[in-house]
């Protein structure tokens, strides 16, 4: 199991959003983007390694002479969404200095000082060390430390982002997979509505700890002089895998640049999945309302992926819809003709990062007439009591989804293609 997957599935139930194993912006992005990091309105993909691959921002006007952060271009016919006045709720101290979020471990007494001591205004560096113990009974452990705390921001009108995404999702898949030639697996498209960001952090994971002795980890953060950035490091015993943020000067942000809050610890937003075997467009008058969910015969296979649903495995000459959804034409989808949903191939960790929303989106497409399913990061939080350890809780999660959806009058959206929301 990749360390990024251990980290994500242990911290997902904490309900802060998707935990980013690589919070730092990717090096190939413009300086303007690297200074701000992942932000509201970003469209991209959460990669299997836990990094956010930025594609474009829905609020940024793009021109060939002045692309801004939309350095890769924008989809054909793209018109940016209006940001609005005071568009986001912002909490500068959502996570206080020296705080930590952890799973299957406990904080021990600080070895020296305390995380986040001092503000750099005195002529000496401030240092803090904090320890963590991993119990011998823990099968997996993940922890995140925030020596400088972290801010949180969320777009007020996330339903506007949802509507904008509904109207443009398929063209965004086309842009990423065809024009840019990147691999955007069906269901991987992510639109950011909120995030938590920091200046410094430490991450550690432990997989399958079976020793009779507990593991110990010590995280040290040293704050430089006169407001300089933190220098972070780990000291670990046993099989722990640590990561930590770099100092500002190591990010090549420019001379005398104070470390910005550009390290994205958690991301919140919409995940979008198109129906596998998307058929040719029909007239909106043929939309079908779904009154209840009764057919659950394939629920035990909803967490399985079909190779044909991923772009890149398609044969030459197929349309972009086929490359995105697996549709081959001829009046039947792959699912109808081949029942690809029952394949025994589990989700390939090298293809897509697991998320509980994938389960919800597949269920919606399996049990409704919707062509596209769109769900928000917070939509599965109400289900988390039956899913405390994703993705090993598919049975309980699916039962809860069935129960909730069977009590609703589910109707496709009035827009075309028909969309199913889970909210």
Image (spheres, rainbow, N blue to C red):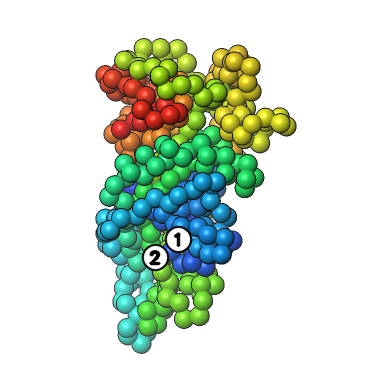
290, above or below 220, in the image: above
Query: What residue would you read off at disc 2?
Result: 261
Q: Give me the disc on residue 302.
A: none
259, above or below 50, in the image: below
Q: Residue furthest right?
A: 316
| Residue drawn at 42 percent across, 41 percent down | 165
Q: Is 85 positioned to the left or the right of 335 in the image?
A: left
Which residue occupies the foreground of this view, 293 or 396?
A: 293
Q: Is 354 positioned to the left or the right of 322 in the image?
A: left
Q: Is residue 72 in sight in this rendering?
A: yes
Q: Is 75 positioned to the left or the right of 148 in the image?
A: right
Q: Residue furthest bottom?
A: 123
Q: Give me the disc on residue 37.
A: 1
Q: Quadrant of residue 350?
A: top right
N-term mark: 2 or 1: 1
Residue 314, how many percent across, how many down? 67, 31
Determine whether the residue tagged by mark 1 lies in a helix, strand or loop.
loop
Residue 217, how many percent across, how many down? 44, 58
| Residue drawn at 32 percent across, 83 percent down | 121
Residue 275, how many percent across, how many down? 50, 26
Quadrant assignment for the C terminus = top left
Residue 128, how many percent across, how many down? 36, 70
Q: Is 304 positioned to the left or the right of 11 in the image?
A: right
Determine whether the residue tagged by mark 2 lies in a helix, strand or loop.
loop
- Tag 2 and tag 1, C-beta contact below 8 Å: yes
Q: Is residue 367 in sight in this rendering?
A: no
| Residue drawn at 31 percent across, 41 percent down | 159
Q: CA distance from mark 2 to mark 1?
A: 8 Å
- Counting every numbered tag in the picture gives 2
């Amino acid at each position: 199991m990749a360390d990024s997957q251990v980290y994500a599935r242990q911290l997902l139930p904490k309900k802060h959003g998707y935990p980013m194993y690589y919070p730092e912006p990717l090096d190939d992005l413009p300086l303007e983007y690297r200074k701000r990091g992942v932000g509201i309105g970003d469209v991209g993909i959460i990669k299997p390694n836990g990094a956010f691959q930025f594609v474009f921002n829905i609020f940024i006007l793009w021109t060939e002479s002045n692309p801004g952060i939309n350095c890769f271009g924008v989809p054909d016919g793209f018109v940016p969404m209006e940001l609005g006045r005071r568009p986001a709720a912002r909490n500068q101290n959502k996570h206080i200095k020296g705080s930590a979020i952890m799973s299957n471990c406990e904080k021990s007494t600080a070895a020296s000082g305390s995380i986040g001591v001092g503000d750099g205004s005195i002529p000496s560096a401030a240092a803090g060390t904090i320890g963590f113990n991993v119990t011998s009974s823990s099968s997996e452990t993940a922890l995140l430390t925030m020596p400088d705390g972290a801010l949180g921001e969320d777009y007020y009108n996330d339903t506007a982002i949802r509507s904008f995404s509904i109207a443009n999702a398929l063209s965004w898949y086309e842009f990423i997979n065809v024009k840019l030639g990147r691999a955007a697996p069906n269901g991987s498209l992510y639109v950011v509505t909120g995030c938590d960001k920091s200046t410094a952090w430490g991450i550690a994971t432990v997989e399958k700890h079976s020793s009779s002795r507990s593991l110990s980890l010590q995280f040290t953060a040293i704050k430089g002089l006169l407001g300089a950035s933190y220098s972070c490091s780990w000291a670990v015993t046993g099989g722990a895998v640590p990561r930590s943020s770099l100092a500002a000067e190591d990010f090549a942000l420019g001379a005398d640049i104070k470390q910005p809050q550009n390290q994205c610890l958690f991301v919140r937003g919409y995940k979008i999945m198109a129906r596998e075997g998307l058929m040719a467009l029909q007239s909106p008058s043929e939309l079908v309302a779904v009154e209840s969910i009764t057919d659950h015969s394939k629920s035990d296979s909803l967490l399985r992926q079909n190779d044909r649903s991923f772009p890149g495995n398609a044969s030459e000459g197929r349309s972009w819809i086929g490359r995105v959804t697996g549709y081959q034409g001829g009046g039947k989808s792959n699912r109808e003709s081949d029942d690809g949903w029952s394949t025994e191939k589990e989700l390939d960790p090298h293809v897509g990062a697991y998320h509980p929303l994938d389960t919800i989106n597949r269920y919606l497409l399996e049990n409704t007439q919707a062509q596209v399913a769109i769900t928000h990061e917070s939509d599965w939080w109400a289900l988390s009591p039956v899913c405390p350890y994703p993705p090993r809780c598919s049975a309980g999660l699916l039962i809860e989804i069935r129960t909730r959806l069977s009590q609703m009058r589910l109707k496709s959206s009035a827009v075309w293609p028909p969309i199913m929301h889970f909210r």
